[in-house]
Image: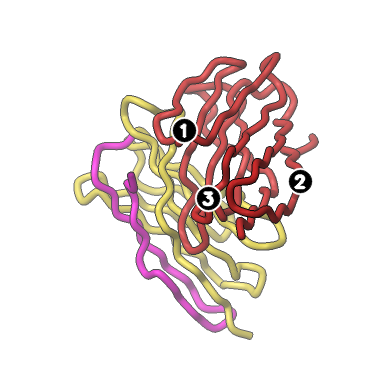
Amino acid sequence: EAGVAQSPRYKIIEKRQSVAFWCNPISGHATLYWYQQILGQGPKLLIQFQNNGVVDDSQLPKDRFSAERLKGVDSTLKIQPAKLEDSAVYLCASSSDRGISYEQYFGPGTRLTVT
Amino acid sequence: SQQGEEDPQALSIQEGENATMNCSYKTSINNLQWYRQNSGRGLVHLILIRSNEREKHSGRLRVTLDTSKKSSSLLITASRAADTASYFCATALMNRDDKIIFGKGTRLHILP
């Protein structure tokens, strides 16, 4: 079974620039999560999708972050414009069925550096 | 918001020894999960314990849960160099079992 795929693996941008991350979850997984992990901390949930609908985006900075999951499969997370404090690893995870199978499978992450 | 907090923040032990990490949380949970993160394999799910369970085993891992104290422990027996990683507890709240909140983690270093 193929795992969660993410790209790019690394990205360096200047502040005020835009950046986009892509995630392809495990086939058949209905739930998709985007997390932000700052160095030395645990992952923080940014947004959760169930199929192509948003379940939870309470911690997503909506003035600069946006995410979509068209057709309920792949997802993109965008930051526009980026700030220095956005430097972090952005993790995508998926799980098979909301409320039944709790295990989340994580991708390798995208390490973003904002200079 | 942070729900779980691991203790200690960092731990160094000799290979072959046992490692114990603790997690405390604030509000009632549906389940508690432990994850491991290292540079090689990323963030990986280790074990899940439900609120009505007190102990679970998986290979060299033993997890306990005390809901009265709102705490959990992860024991790794006979540690190996490959166990060097950060370990996170993640809690799922009673009304949102599909959402987990991670703690800051314990950095475990196994010395040769």
Residue found at the far left of this picture: B68
Picture coordinates of residue B21 (x, y %)? 41, 64
Classify residue B39 by image quadrant.
bottom right
Circle 3 marks a residue in which chain?
A
Left or right of B50 on screen, residue A17: right
Query: What is the distance, in whole Å, between disc 1 and disc 2 at their CAs?
Result: 23 Å
Name the residue beneath numbered marker 1: A63
Disc nearer the start of the sequence (1/3) = 1
Secondary structure found at label 1: loop
User: Between tags 2 and 3, which lies in front?
Assistant: 3
Which contiguous range is marked in magenta? B1-29
The disc labelled 3 sits on which kind of residue? Lys
Circle 2 marks a residue in which chain?
A
Q: Residue B25 colored magenta?
A: yes
* Residue drawn at (54%, 83%) of the image: B14
Q: In which quarter of the image is the N terminus of chain B?
A: top left
User: On screen, A101 above or below B87?
Assistant: above
Name the residue beneath numbered marker 2: A8
